[in-house]
Image (tube, rainbow, N blue to C red):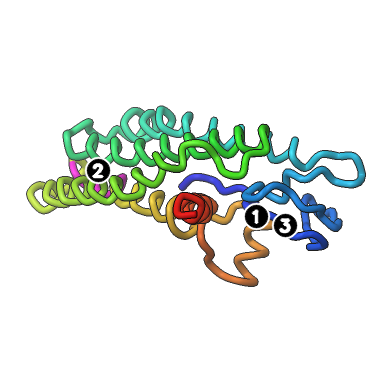
Amino acid sequence: MEPSTDRREITPPGKVDIFKNAIYTAPPGPPGMSESAVRHPSGQGPGIALQRRLRSLIAGEVVNIPLQAAIWYGIVGFPATWANLVGFAVFSLLLIQGAAYWAAKLEQLRNRRALPRGMSAFAVARVANLAVLGAGLLATGAAVLTDPGRGSLPGLGFALFAVLEHVNYFHTQLMHDTVADLRRFRTVGFRRSQLARDLARHSKSSRA
């Protein structure tokens, strides 16, 4: 599961923001921009810290692909059967989409855009993923039923993990790996992912 960032929507004037345990009254920012991108009155820039966080998320998603391949196929020794490779390919696709989204968020933050670039492509991916994930689950599931074992079960596991990645990115935030995320989860529970909120704003602006 990919890591998450403290993803908050735009702050209305006067709303209290929490960033790195510093509480301040955040000024209004451009529509769709994370409130964390607003400069802290102390002179420190939360936007700089957020950019660093986004760069680490991009690198983490990209590096995870060869890293996971090395762990499961190299160290653990799972065979590179067609079922295992299909499941891993679907899993890798979701990681690539995640990296692309964080790159778009980084570009949005740097240029203070209302929305990240490429929202139309992500809207297509959200629908196309259903077919890809369905095909991956059917293929790897059939392989498990036909010949269960190390040659098929890892592939099904990768495909199921890809489903969780899709939900985490395109619908509901499942991953909570920061103090702010955990605090918010204890208070309000699950909520829509940042990409889902960006897609909703994109859809609304397209209809306007």
The crowd level at tag 3 (other Cα within 10 Å; few <14, some 14-19, many 20+) is many
Seen from the viewer's position, the closer of residues 67 and 71 is: 67
Please report contact status of discs 3 and 1: CB closer than 8 Å, yes or no. Answer: yes
Work out how far the residue at label 3 is from the one at label 2, CA to CA, in angstroms.
Answer: 43 Å
- Identified at 55% across, 40% down, the residue is 116
Quarter of the image where one finds residue 183:
bottom right
- From the image, tell me which residue sits under label 2: 155
Q: Position of residue 111 (x, y in %)?
A: 66, 33
What is the CA distance from the residue labelled 2 to the residue labelled 1? Answer: 35 Å
Where is residue 170? Give x, y as percent: 43, 52
Which residue position holds label 1?
8
Q: Are marks 3 and 2 in contact (CB under 8 Å)?
A: no
Nearer the observer, 24 or 76:
24
N-terminal label among 3 and 2: 3
Q: Report helix, strand or loop for mark 2.
A: helix
- Amino acid residing under circle 1: Arg
Left or right of 95 in this view: 136: left
Amino acid carrying mark 2 in the image: Gly
Range covered by the magenta-colored residues = 152-158
Q: Residues within 10 Å of mark 2 (few under 14, many from 20)?
A: many
Please determine whether, in this image, residue 154 is positioned above or below residue 8.
above
